[in-house]
């Protein structure tokens, strides 16, 4: 099977989740990758280590803005040039918005939120998350072209090859492809992106106020983790909305999720239940989070978290 | 301003999910308007109140979805359309919406960024592409300025401000508007508002939900004394292998 994988970069560095998508694609067929915007050729070629033989690169700088329609057109053009039967993309705010448009452009069936490699023993069946993490569905995709958006951590990264060939991909964009104009970007540089993070430290109302968040940032910094928060915390503007994890916020799937002073309402758990390991720290021994967590600590966050930071530092020394 | 708001009809967030006969066991399940769709509807009603115009609400579903449609009318939609079909997948739903919308001259089509049952988040993009309109998701803010709209779209680690000419499609989420709770006058008026039932069109290339499964049961939470953080770090390193 011929597979096209869309790879996204952040500040010129290809996202780990995109490399996971390349590994995913290489387990299904022969992979060509497609990338856009300002990325160095050496960075693009490194995608070959994860199983791509070739990278089609459209260096048009207008694509640095992540325009939904233009990105969809680029990927569709790459499908046509590579003759791909299957398009694989790792979920992101851009991919979630683009995948459907790609599917229509290339006449493909599309399935989002895929959780495992496809079963091709009888047709093409993928497992996907449904009911906000409370269940999975096995979905049969009809013959013909297919587009999949794949969740993080579905396959571990595997280095199997060497550098890929990088080719410029020229796309005849129309003005209408850039009809949505970016006016400004509001983003904290240097932060670990929450949806990409392997470790997340999250906190809730138990922190009592935004002035107490330094302790959470210290724990995150010690672990190399991203910071997150519960919905009430973002509703009260203690933390920005893009840190809100839960059913109506960001859904995360890190290796380690540490919840501090979060009770564990079902809406919050819906956003974190794909985490590999969950640690809950709460002074209420009846907090529902302890039913969903792997490890629990009953105690006052203001006493426990500094001790945890110290213990991690001691372990690192 | 002529706005179409597409709503899903989904199990209440706190529902314990079970399956019977290879479909959701709806016994004892309370259904609600999709939470993200509620945000889209609330913003559409606010825009109508400020700019004038109409809000039409559309649902693809069988007759049992009508309580959700009536609730949307009570919240402030002017009229409603129900495409009389059980939703099969995102493509099926999108094609039903487009088949209806393409003859109606809407300025915008709003919906939630995803439904909270099947969580595909594809319908806004499919509708946008099929209508040949721009689509913007996840949309956190939407303001109208003449014939253009200014939106905030969530991106990793923040948000971007974008501008687009109408018409367009937006997949919405909080904090685009406060949810609206219908009042008694709205509920009474909703009973008299028109609800049109339209038969579906055939759609090829849809996916098939073969089977469902529940996640593995979590083991017991291992409790660690608050004074023993070295022990917790040891467990995370040596047992869970995440440090």
Image: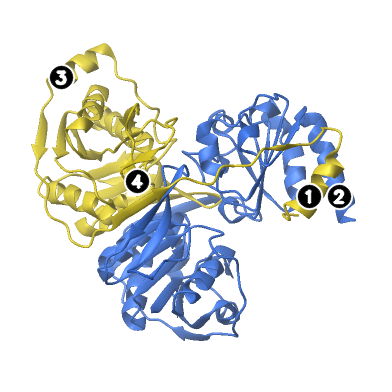
Earlier in the chain: of badge 4 and badge 3, it is 4
Chain of the residue where label 4 is placed in the rendered structure: B
Colour of chain B in the rendered structure image: yellow
Q: Disc 4 versus disc 1: distance between alpha carbons?
A: 37 Å
With respect to residue A276, does B43 lie above or below?
A: above
Q: Nearer the viewer, residue B148 or B38?
A: B38
Q: Which residue is mark 1?
A: A222
Chain of the residue where label 2 is placed in the rendered structure: A
Do labels 1 and 2 touch, CB within 8 Å?
A: yes
Chain of the residue where label 1 is placed in the rendered structure: A
**SS category of the residue bearing label 4:** strand
Q: Which residue is mark 2?
A: A313
Chain of the residue where label 3 is placed in the rendered structure: B
Q: Nearer the viewer, residue A31 or B162?
A: A31
With respect to residue A20, does A219 lie above or below?
A: above
Circle 3: is it few (<14), some (14-19), or many (20+) Cα within 10 Å?
few
Q: Disc 3 versus disc 2: distance between alpha carbons?
A: 64 Å
Query: Which corner quadrant holds the C terminus of chain B?
Result: bottom right
Q: Disc 1 versus disc 2: distance between alpha carbons?
A: 7 Å
Q: How is the image coloured?
A: by chain
Task: Tell me whether marks 4 and 1 sit on the same chain.
Answer: no
Say which mark, if any, is on residue B171.
4
Q: Which residue is mark 3?
A: B191
Location of residue B84 in the rendering, given as x and y in whole percent from the top left corner = 14, 40
Q: Disc 3 versus disc 1: distance between alpha carbons?
A: 58 Å
């Amino acid at each position: 099977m011929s597979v096209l994988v869309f790879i996204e970069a952040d500040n010129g560095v290809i996202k780990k989740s995109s490399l996971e998508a390349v590994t995913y694609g290489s387990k299904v067929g022969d992979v060509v990758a497609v990338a856009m915007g300002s990325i160095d050729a050496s960075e693009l070629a490194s995608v070959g280590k994860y199983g791509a033989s070739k990278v089609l690169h459209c260096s048009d700088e207008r694509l640095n803005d992540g325009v939904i329609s233009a990105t969809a057109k680029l990927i569709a053009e790459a499908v046509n040039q590579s003759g791909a039967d299957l398009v694989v993309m790792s979920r992101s705010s851009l991919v979630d918005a683009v995948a459907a448009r790609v599917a229509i452009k290339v006449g493909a069936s599309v399935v989002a939120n895929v959780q495992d490699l496809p079963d091709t023993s009888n047709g093409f069946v993928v497992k996907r998350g449904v009911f906000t993490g409370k269940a999975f569905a096995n979905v049969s995709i009809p013959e013909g072209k297919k587009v999949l958006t794949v969740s993080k951590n579905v396959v571990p990264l595997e280095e199997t090859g060497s550098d890929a060939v990088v080719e410029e991909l020229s796309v005849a964009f129309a003005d209408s492809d850039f009809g949505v104009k970016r006016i400004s970007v509001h983003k904290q540089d240097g932060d670990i992106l929450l949806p990409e993070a392997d470790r997340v430290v999250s906190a809730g109302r138990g922190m009592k106020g935004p002035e107490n968040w330094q302790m959470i940032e210290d724990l995150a910094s010690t672990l190399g983790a991203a910071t997150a928060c519960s919905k009430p915390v973002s509703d009260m503007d203690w933390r920005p909305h893009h840190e809100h994890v839960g059913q109506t916020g960001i859904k995360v799937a890190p290796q380690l999720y540490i919840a501090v002073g979060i009770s564990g309402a079902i809406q919050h758990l819906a956003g974190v239940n794909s985490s590999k390991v969950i640690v809950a720290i709460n002074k209420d021994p009846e907090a529902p989070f302890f039913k969903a967590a792997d490890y629990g600590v009953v105690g006052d966050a203001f006493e426990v978290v500094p001790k945890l930071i110290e213990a991690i530092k001691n372990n690192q020394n | 301003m002529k706005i179409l708001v597409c709503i899903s009809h989904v199990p209440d967030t706190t529902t314990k999910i079970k399956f019977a006969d290879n479909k959701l066991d709806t016994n004892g399940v309370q259904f609600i308007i999709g939470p993200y769709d509620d945000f889209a509807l609330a913003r559409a009603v606010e825009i109508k109140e400020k700019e004038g115009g109409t809000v039409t609400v559309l649902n693809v579903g069988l007759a049992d979805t009508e309580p959700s449609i009536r609730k949307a009318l009570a919240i402030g939609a002017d009229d409603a359309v129900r495409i009389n079909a059980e939703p099969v997948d995102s493509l099926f739903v999108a094609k039903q919406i487009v088949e209806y919308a393409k003859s109606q001259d809407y300025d915008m089509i709003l919906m939630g960024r995803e439904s909270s049952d099947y969580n595909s988040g594809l319908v806004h993009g499919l509708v946008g592409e099929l209508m040949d309109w721009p689509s913007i998701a996840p949309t956190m803010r939407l303001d109208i300025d003449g014939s253009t709209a200014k939106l905030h779209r969530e991106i990793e680690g923040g948000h971007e401000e974008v501008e687009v000419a109408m018409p367009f499609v937006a997949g919405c989420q909080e904090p685009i508007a406060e949810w609206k709770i219908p009042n008694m006058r709205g509920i009474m008026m909703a009973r008299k508002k028109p609800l049109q039932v339209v038969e579906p069109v055939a759609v090829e290339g849809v996916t098939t939900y073969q089977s469902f499964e529940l996640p593995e049961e979590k083991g017991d939470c291992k409790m660690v004394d608050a004074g023993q953080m070295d022990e917790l770090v040891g467990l995370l390193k040596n047992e869970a292998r995440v440090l």
